[in-house]
Amino acid sequence: MISYLEGEVFEKDADSLIVLVGGIGLKVFTTQNLLLQAEPGQKITLRTHFIVRQDLMTLYGFETEEEVRFFGLLMGVSGVGPRLALSILSSAGVETVRRAVVQDQPDFLSRVPGVGKKTAQKIALHLQGRISGLADGIASADFHAADFEVIEALTGLGYSIVQAQAAVQALPKDTPDDVEEKLRLALQSLG
């Protein structure tokens, strides 16, 4: 099994990179965030998840071991394959998935393209008990219900989940727990 690779970015497509490793070009499907950062000629190190099926072998690459772990956990959910798991990590990221599960907010995951309400509920149910906000350094008190409402409002305005989450996380700690105030400040930071 291939679990790690180090090489040079040869080429990038809409959903994958061709990474030269020892003179061989490996096609590695990866998150949009990593695709935006990677440039041809750049050295790259990836944690990978290798999937072998009867008619296909695919390699998925991530920046961290935690992303690989969440990728595997997401694929364990009925109805979630590798492409959808990768899309969830691309759109929402590990922290968003973790918070949605820890805070019991499966509707938040349904904002990810390709994830309906039933799939979001399956993901939250499957991941409960398998991930812990406290064990992974996230206290559940760090993310309030008002934050979810602000993120939902921002995604409704056309911002991505990642942008919305980053704007909420960047709010000063002394910001009142008022949705309107948080939304106003978040929009200022995004504008």
Image (cartoon, grey):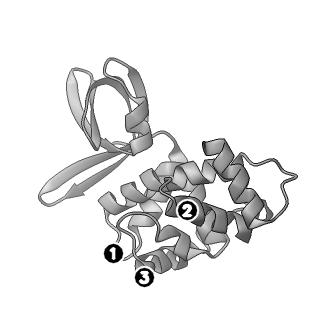
x and y percentages locating residue 2 in the rendered image: 33, 42
Q: Quadrant of residue 51?
A: bottom left
x and y percentages locating residue 25 in the rendered image: 21, 29
Count neighbours of disc 3 (C-alpha within 10 A) and say few if under 14, some if 14 to 19, many if 20 or more. few
Residue type indicated by callout 2:
Val
Q: Which comes before the other along the chain, label 1 or label 3?
A: 1
Element on which disc 2 rests: helix
> Is residue 79 visible from the viewing direction of this image?
yes
Q: Where is mark 1, residue-wise?
A: 79
Q: Is residue 36 above or below residue 94?
A: above
Element on which disc 3 rests: helix
Q: Quadrant of residue 91?
A: bottom left
Q: Is residue 75 above or below residue 50?
A: below
Left or right? Give the position of 124 relative to 58: right
Q: Where is mark 3, residue-wise?
A: 118
Q: CA distance from mark 3 to mark 2?
A: 15 Å
> Is residue 131 visible from the viewing direction of this image?
no
Between residues 95 and 181, which one lies in front from this camera angle? 181
Residue type indicated by callout 3:
Lys
Between residues 147 and 187, which one lies in front from this camera angle? 187
Residue appearing at x 47%, y 75% in the figure: 120
x and y percentages locating residue 48 in the rendered image: 39, 43
Element on which disc 1 rests: loop
In which quadrant will I find the C terminus?
top right
Q: CA distance from mark 2 to mark 1?
A: 17 Å
Residue appearing at x 84%, y 54% in the figure: 175
Q: Which comes before the other along the chain, label 2 or label 1?
A: 1
Q: What is the number of the mark on residue 97?
A: 2
